[in-house]
Every structure is written in C-alpha cells, then in structure tokens.
Image (cartoon, rainbow, N blue to C red):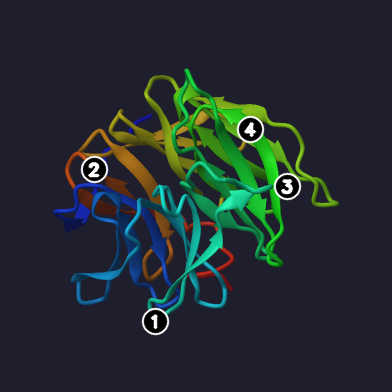
Amino acid sequence: MERADRLEPIATGFDSPEGPCFAENGDLYFVNWLSSSINRLGPDGVVREFVNTGGIPAGLAFHRDGTLYCADEGKDIHGILKISPDGKIAGFVDSYQGRPLNGANDLVFDRNGVLYFSDPWGSSAERPTGAFYRAFPDGRLEQLDTGLAFPNGVALNADESAVFLAETYRNQVLRYPIGRDGAVGRPTVFTRLSDGPGPDGMAFDADGHLYVAHFGEGRVDVFDQDGRAVDRIPVPGREVTNVAFGGPDFDTLVVTECQTASVYRLKLGVKGQRLFGGLNHR
C-alpha cells in the first residue's frame, strides 16, 4: 500500500541533509554533511548552524544529559563526537583495539545509555569491511559484527530485545537478538527490500512498526514486527537518507532527502517510540 499523504518541506537549500534528531525542547537538529555542519531548526522556523565538525557528520542522537552525540565519517574523526549544549566538541570513540574505526554513520542509545553505532566508511558489496559496535558509558567498546556491506541505520525495538541494522549494499535489514544478560547474538535477516539501492536511516513507532528510509527509491518503507512491508510513504526526491519522530504530539515523521535538498514532515497520527534522550524520552 502506498500512502497518498503529502510531505511538507520545513527546511530547504541543504544539499546533503541527514541525521534528523529532536532535542528535549522540540528543536530539530540535522546535519548537512557536505558542509560539515550540524543545524538547528527552532520554533521560529529558521535554520541556524549549531556547530561545524570539519568532518562528515551523519547520524545524531541525544543523551539524557543533553549532550548531542554525532557519528562522523570524516577521515580525521572517523568515530563518535560528543557535543555539549553550548557547542563544545569532544571525541568519544575513534578506535578499536588500537586501530582506527572506518567512519561512523548512525547511532542509537538504549535505556542504560549504551550507544550502538554503525561503522561503514569505505565498505561496499565488493569490499565488505563495515562493522557494528556498541560503546558503554565507561568507554568500553564492543565489536558486534564485521564483514558488512555498508552498515547504515540503527534502531532498537521497544523492549530492547533486539537491535536492527540496515545493511545498504545487501539491500537488507538485519536483526540482532539481545539476551536478558545483555549479550548480543548473531543476526538474522529481518527483511529484504524489494528494490535498490538499499536501506538507510530507520526509526520505530510506538506500535512497533519500523520506518526505513529507502535511498534511491524516493520513499519510506514501513515494516511490521515480522518484517512484512505494510506501507509506503512517497517522498518528492529519490535520495531519502533518514527519518525521525517529533512534533508537539510526537506523532510527526521527519524525513531528510538529498535530491530536493530538503527536510520534510508528515503528521502520521501514530506516536514515535520513546528514546533515551531528546524529545519525549520520559
């Protein structure tokens, strides 16, 4: 099924928008990676640059303490940055067992402040060197998987019994089970997308549906808890990069798209899943 709803542009003129993320006060943050910028859209409808990382920022996630975490693929960063509310930038993780990370792309916190993130930079179907990690609050870094063909969007389901990872160049979303002891198991294929190039950023709604930005196909695909496609949301441009829930009632889907250089919103009437930090985390 394809929805007839029309998305409303709320920010335009950004040639590489990605990583939408809502602060606790409702402000929308998103990156424009070609200009290395992290931008903030406030209640006045004006977009202002919050900080410039000097790298290739991609995914954003708020910690409960108000710190903004950024996955940055830049060659001099290639990891996760921490950005204070007043815009001070500090490194969080950039290496594993003494070797630099590839370049982080997307990230999500669990309820205990453990950060799951993808590390794809330089990987492809022909060169599957991407990896998947989680970083603990004490700084310990655990590698969850390797040999991935551009691991991309990351999302946790509501009870945190599984973490989901978009593997773009194999056109699939992987599901990693999380045991009661916190151990992460081997992945299974949650769903394969019907056409290419592949999945990008992802977000869950409160009913357990997974919204997947389908890069190259001009839409957001929606899957039920069994991985079955149940809805499609058309987007004006084909290069759909990411999605997030926000708005006054937390039932508005925000979509970033590069071909039209825009950020869009669509009031869905279904709330997003609660997050560890940012808007509606309580």
x, y percentage for residue 254? 34, 54
Residue furthest out toward the front = 98
x, y percentage for residue 160? 69, 52
**Amino acid tagged 3:** Ser
Residue under pointer 1: 86
Q: Is residue 207 left or right of residue 201?
A: right
Q: Is residue 202 left or right of residue 254?
A: right
x, y percentage for residue 111? 67, 63
For the residues labelled 3 and 4, say whether their Cβ atoms are less than 8 Å apart. Answer: no
- Circle 3: element type: loop
The tag earlier along the polypeptide, 3 or 4, is: 4
Q: In this rendering, does residue 5 appear at all?
A: yes
Residue under pointer 2: 258
Question: Is 17 placed above or below 49 here?
Answer: above
Circle 3 residues within 10 Å: few <14, some 14–19, many ≥20: some
Residue under pointer 3: 161
Question: For the residues marked 2 and 1, what is the alpha-carbon distance in whole angstroms?
Answer: 28 Å
